[in-house]
Amino acid sequence: MLQKIGVWLIVGLVLFTVFKQFDKPKEQNQVTYSQFMDDAKAGKVRRVDVQGRTLQVTPNDGSKYSIITPGDIWMVGDLMKYGVQVTGKADDEPNLLVSALYYLGPTLLIIGFWFFMMRQMQGGGKGGAFSFGKSKARLIDENSNTVTFADVAGCDEAKEEVFEIVDFLKDPQKFQKLGGRIPHGILLVGPPGTGKTLIARAIAGEAKVPFFAISGSDFVEMFVGVGASRVRDMFENAKKNSPCIIFIDEIDAVGRHRGAGMGGGNDEREQTLNQMLVEMDGFESNSGVIVVAATNRSDVLDRALLRPGRFDRQVHVGLPDIRGREQILQVHMRKVPIDPDVNAAVLARGTPGFSGADLANLVNESALFAARRNKRAVDMKDFEDAKDKIYMGPERKSAVMREEERRNTAYHESGHAVVAKSLPKADPVHKVTIMPRGMALGVTWQLPEFDRVNLYKDRMMEELAILFGGRAAEEVFLNSMSTGASNDFERATKMARDMVTRYGMSDSLGTMVYVDTESESMFGRQSSKTVSELTQQKVDAEIRALVDSQYALARSILEQNRDKVEAMVAALLEMETIDAEQITDIMEGRPPRMPKLPAATTFGNSAGTAGPAAGSAPATA
């Protein structure tokens, strides 16, 4: 604080001195020396104050003005003879040192201030003028950190991996007496929102040790050397508070491969990484400081970071399974009043592919829906509406759709749904809607009955047919085409290409990979061609065969089930949204039952335009 005050005082002094140079005294009257002497002789001057060669003249009328004397040695005698009152003294000889400082002082101050700031910005000072060289790590002491493993759910394997870290921090002698060495660094790897930061805080909370938290981007500044200075300062503070944990979030911001950038080996990021490597390698076995880092991209980290002695243990924190999602929901439901009809197991089944952050957002959105409806507790309808909003976006009730547009959308979505219900291995259709949400005019949503790990050829072939159901329905029933199937075509083409080129699911091309290899260099991503032109033509022909065969299958199914498509279209035009039970009624030839109030508490909601993937609920817009 005192350093900042001193810096601003220097800045103010420099500015004051500079402005003072331009502050010239204003001359009140333009009177010549001859005119002044004539006025004095005529008795018009009452008083003269002499200050060196400057005369402050006071005429009889009381006004004042200043003039410079040309060095008249008889002036004072003449003035006294004319009856003018003369006061003052002769000015001293000018001090050369004072004059030099007066004229050169501002320049010297500016130069000195500039060197001072540069030295501090580059980490040369202990604290830095504005603490540029100080670490930005936020310290959470053991009394403030209340997060424990009880607050972490859905990642039991990850908790088991890091639990021995807690034992080491509590009782290091238990490991050291047997010659064991706890890992200096632990790297938490996983998709965003899976709880990596929460696990790191839980380790410190369980062990009751200080927790230093910082992001990888906080090390990097525009001045070279600042990041390295912050790394040194952070580790010094950590050693003073050992045993403790240093948590670096998004470490890939500074930990990427060295030499891959245009800046060579002297850029700020690489200097910061080098300092981090030195600090971690310099740990003593009993230092009691453990570094926990998190990243979504472990593949881009420098190999020196991952070698033994640094981040020699990687813990994968993946998306939770159905049991993990149920546990996470129960953790977050403690914070809101829940209606007795809410079933966490049902919600867990209806949210495949959700991360811990997604589930926390689901509970929060549900509470907001309940608050808007002036409810005392959050019920299942609120959770259903929240899932609809998260998957598909908010309802665009203000969107004005012509009746013809609604009818075309109903045929498109009915085509997806009827094809999906007619194929034996397709995921069950949960909901079909023509209510505009987000960017989609309508959505057909399929909900898997269990978490899926692998994709199989027969299921992928059926998924291709389902994706083509919308366009096939437009051609069969409307005898036209629209742009609404563009996203379906993109996903179908990508899936068919992956089946042929990546997964070896082509009988004619066999089990080979036909994808050009890609690599990263200092100029970005580069691809090397490994497929000949003749082979590429065969690949394109095989993709075309897959697409055409499944499009023909979708069209055939719709032509055989015209009555069911027409019945579903009529239901959608009347109710806008139909659920799994109503879809089953239509497919079995019965009139669809009226919707239940509150909304159906079956499993899940539509997923907007999200593509089908392992563990996710596919939806077709």
Image (cartoon, grey):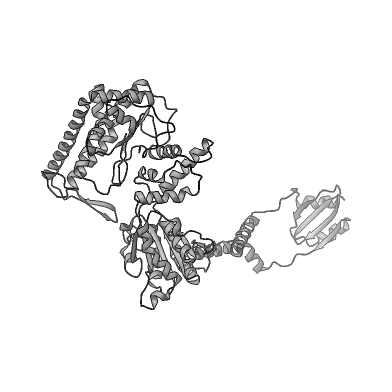
Q: Residue at x 31, y 30 (%)?
A: 583
Is residue 357 toward the left or the right of residue 531 in the image?
Answer: right
Q: Is 320 rendered above or below residue 592?
A: below
Task: Please tell me which residue lies in front, 461 or 13.
Answer: 461
Would residue 537 be seen by someone viewing this image from the given angle? Answer: yes
Residue 611, image x, y percentages: 30, 41
User: For this view, does 104 lie left or right of residue 603?
Assistant: right
Residue 585: percent from left, percent from top = 31, 28
Q: Nearer the viewer, residue 338 or 312?
A: 338
Q: Nearer the viewer, residue 111 or 83?
A: 111
The image quadrant that residue 314 belongs to is: bottom left
The answer to whether residue 261 of the structure is visible from this angle is: no
Quarter of the rendering containing residue 12? bottom right
Q: Residue at x 30, y 57 (%)?
A: 299
Quarter-wise, where is residue 600 in the image?
A: top left
Name the quarter where the N terminus is drawn: bottom right
On the image, the x and y values in percent for residue 445 come to 32, 36
- Is 146 drawn above or below residue 239 in the view shown? above
Residue 558: % across, % down = 22, 27
Residue under the image location 41 percent in, 51 percent down: 327
Of residues 184 and 116, the one drawn nearer to the viewer in this rendering: 184
In which quadrant will I find the C terminus?
top left
